[in-house]
Amino acid sequence: MNIFSHLLNRGLAHVMRYSSTPQHFKESVAEHSFYTAYYASLLCDLLEKVDVHVGRERAITMALIHDTEEMFSGDILNPFKHYSSDLKEAIQKVNTEVIPLMYEGLPEYMKEKYITLWNEESKGESMEAKVVKIADRLSLLTKCAEEVKVGNEFFEKIYESHLAFLVGFNAPWWEKIKHQVLPL
């Protein structure tokens, strides 16, 4: 099977994040996913040094694909997405239904692999998924820091709230490394 038609789909490079917030530097979902994957890799390195096992390849792959449903939904605004549990569940249901479309053109075994990893990351229960959730927050935090650094006050509250979340997050594995990650 030739996957070239799948490779031609670069739609995530055109889905912009923070669409309702004025910003100096536009960030695509593809760009965000790169940083999330990179930060997940860094977290895996730190965790390895404190004897916490994480499947690095799984974590990095999850990070690369964690927002692929946004190819169809766009970047749904956080306050809207989390307005109610019913709405959040409805969005998740639709995302679960459309995610297979993202992997059209891939051999079935590959398609199933990516759908399975996307579902696992969405649930956030495995160690790899938890690492990706923190890497995702770090990506958001660093984007906000960049905007704040150039004087964009619109990102200050977002930065502060996500930094406070990361500082206050107290999973045992995170407690072992957060002092190496955050400006404490």
Image: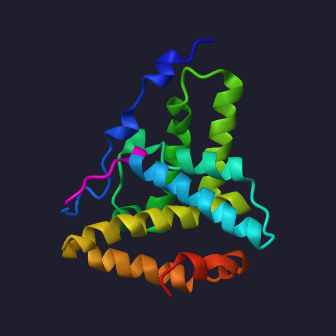
Q: Is residue 127 left or right of residue 61?
A: right
Q: How is the image coloured?
A: rainbow
Magenta stretch bounds: 24-30
Please give left or right for residue 164 compared with residue 173 in the image. Answer: left
> Quadrant of the rendered structure where residue 156 is?
bottom left
Q: Which is nearer the eye, 148 or 14? A: 148
Q: Does residue 130 appear anywhere in the picture?
A: no
Q: Residue furthest top?
A: 1
Image coordinates of residue 33 in percent, x first then y, are 47, 50
Q: Position of residue 155 (x, y in %)?
A: 27, 72
Q: Position of residue 83 (x, y in %)?
A: 39, 68
Q: Is residue 60 visible?
A: yes
Figure quadrant of residue 140: bottom left
The residue drawn where x is 55% and y is 86% is 168
Q: Residue drawn at (65%, 77%), measured in percent from left and top?
A: 177
Q: Name the chief secondary structure element in magenta.
A: loop
Q: As displayed, is residue 59 above or below residue 99?
A: below
> Which residue is found at the position 75% from the left and 59% from the top?
54
Q: Quadrant of the N terminus?
A: top right
Query: Residue at (66%, 45%) from the top-left corner?
Result: 117
User: Of residues 77 and 67, which is closer to you in this image?
Assistant: 67
Closer-to-camera residue (140/176): 176
Can you say whether 39 is above or below 2 in the image? Answer: below
